[in-house]
Amino acid sequence: MSTPVSIAVLDETHDEHRLRALLERGLPLTSRPWHSLAEQCGMSEADVMACVRRWQAEGLIKRMGLVVKHHALGVRANAMVVWDVPDDAVSELGQRLAAEPAVTLCYRRPRRLPDWPYNLFCMIHGTRRDRVLAVLGGIVERQALQAIPHRVLFSLKAYKQRGGRYTREDDSHDRRTPQPA
């Protein structure tokens, strides 16, 4: 009896597996990150980019982003501002808030009534609470949001931040070889 192995794993080369593991650590901070990855996993830069595009098309990689370690940079006053916006106005207001320079993240979420009436969330980072609140006051004034109910939630603890994981922690063997269950 054989152990079932997915076709994607069987088709993956050792170099592609190495690339997946390297991508988990994040892109190298160089002027040519794809070239640097290619050198580390024995592929050409064009092959690395083609492989990443293929993984995106297949849904293995849904998005690529940046993880900023705010606390290490001295940014410790991180406020999530939650807004109770009329449903017919949330998209337009979300776009306006997202365009504000101090807003680093803005998204819509469903309300969780009766306890949580908020449906629009935006993040403002700063070094001190009073400065973040002053920035928020400016946004409320500029955007005429005085009548929109909202709450300011400052984070109390920084949890582990990391990007996506595509390989198992103990996955150093060649993935083309099926392993016993």
Image (spheres, grey):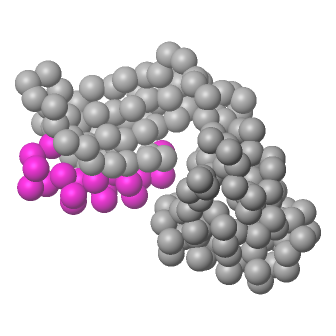
Q: Quadrant of the C terminus?
A: top right
**In this view, 112 is above or below 67:** above
Left or right, residue 24 beside residue 139: right
Observer able to see residue 144: yes
Q: Is residue 96 magenta?
A: yes
Observer able to see residue 66: no
Of residues 177 and 87, the one drawn nearer to the viewer in this rendering:
177
Rendered location of residue 164, percent (x, y): 59, 48
Left or right, residue 39 beside residue 138: right
The residue lying at 20 percent from left, 34 percent from top is 118
Rendered location of residue 85, percent (x, y): 15, 43
Please identify the quarter of the rendering in which residue 122 is found.
Answer: top left
Please identify the quarter of the rendering in which residue 159 is found.
Answer: top right
Q: Is residue 89 magenta?
A: yes
**In this view, 58 is above or below 150:** below
Region rendered in magenta: 84-102
